[in-house]
């Protein structure tokens, strides 16, 4: 279980690190107003809509889908198989939510005045906090014996 926990934790913090790098890159690329996109233009509205739609689909899909799958994994007898599936789908869950966080912060920097994208970033960051891996969480979600 420790290997699975380390792997998931590394991916979890990697998404926060890449988001910080994305924010830094977005800031550096949009320092001058020539590279920003007008929020009320058709392109700006399309980008905002895509980011919000992705957020609205990915977070419930990731959280609810993972919960349903973890309920099925409880019936598996082999602990190694449980942990393998848990690790694989935890990374997918983190990727779905982490991607929402990253694209919303990048879009925010390119459309400076669009506050809804900053809210999307906040929502995705909070959803990612709910996915924070801990040993106790893995034990309870998979009905494992405590080590």
Image (cartoon, rainbow, N blue to C red):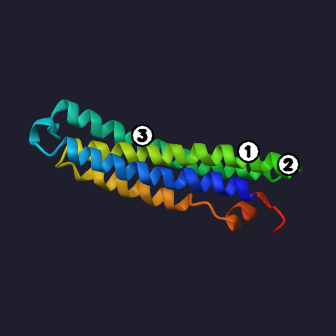
The crowding category of the residue bearing disc 2, from other C-alpha atoms within 10 Å (few below 14, some 14 to 19, many at least 20), is: few
Question: Which numbered marker is on residue 102?
Answer: none
Q: Which sits earlier in the primary sequence, circle 2 or circle 1?
A: 2
Query: Where is the N terminus found, in terms of image quarters?
Result: bottom right
- Residue depicted at x 26% and y 44%: 26
Q: Position of residue 81 (x, y in %)?
A: 81, 45
Q: Position of residue 72 (x, y in %)?
A: 77, 48
Q: Is residue 106 above or below residue 13?
A: above
- Residue depicted at x 80% and y 61%: 143
Along the line of sight, the residue nearer the viewer: 53 or 81:
81
Residue bearing the label numbered 1: 85
Q: CA distance from mark 1 to mark 3?
A: 25 Å
- Furthest residue toward left: 33
Residue bearing the label numbered 2: 76
Q: Which sits earlier in the primary sequence, circle 1 or circle 3?
A: 3
Q: Is residue 79 above or below residue 110?
A: below
The secondary structure type at the circle numbered 2 is loop
Q: CA distance from mark 2 to mark 1?
A: 10 Å
1 vs 3, front mark: 1
- Furthest residue toward top: 42
Along the line of sight, the residue nearer the viewer: 92 or 41:
92
- Residue depicted at x 35% and y 36%: 50
Residue bearing the label numbered 3: 54
Q: Is residue 137 above or below residue 63?
A: below
The secondary structure type at the circle numbered 3 is helix
Q: CA distance from mark 2 to mark 3?
A: 32 Å
Q: Position of residue 92 (x, y in %)?
A: 59, 42
Badge 2 vs badge 1, beta-carbon distance below 8 Å: yes
- Residue depicted at x 57% and y 53%: 10
């Amino acid at each position: 279980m420790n290997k699975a926990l380390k792997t998931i934790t590394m991916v979890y913090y990697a998404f926060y690190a890449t988001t910080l790098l994305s924010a830094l890159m977005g800031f550096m690329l949009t320092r001058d107003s020539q590279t920003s996109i007008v929020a009320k233009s058709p392109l700006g509205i399309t980008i905002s809509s895509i980011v919000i739609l992705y957020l609205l689909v990915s977070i419930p899909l990731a959280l609810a889908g993972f919960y349903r799958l973890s309920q099925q994994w409880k019936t598996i007898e082999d602990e190694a198989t449980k942990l393998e599936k848990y690790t694989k789908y935890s990374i997918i869950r983190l990727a779905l939510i982490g991607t929402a966080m990253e694209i919303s912060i990048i879009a925010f920097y390119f459309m400076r005045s669009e506050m809804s994208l900053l809210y999307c970033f906040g929502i995705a960051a909070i959803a990612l906090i709910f996915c924070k891996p801990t040993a106790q969480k893995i034990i309870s979600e998979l009905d494992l014996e405590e080590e």
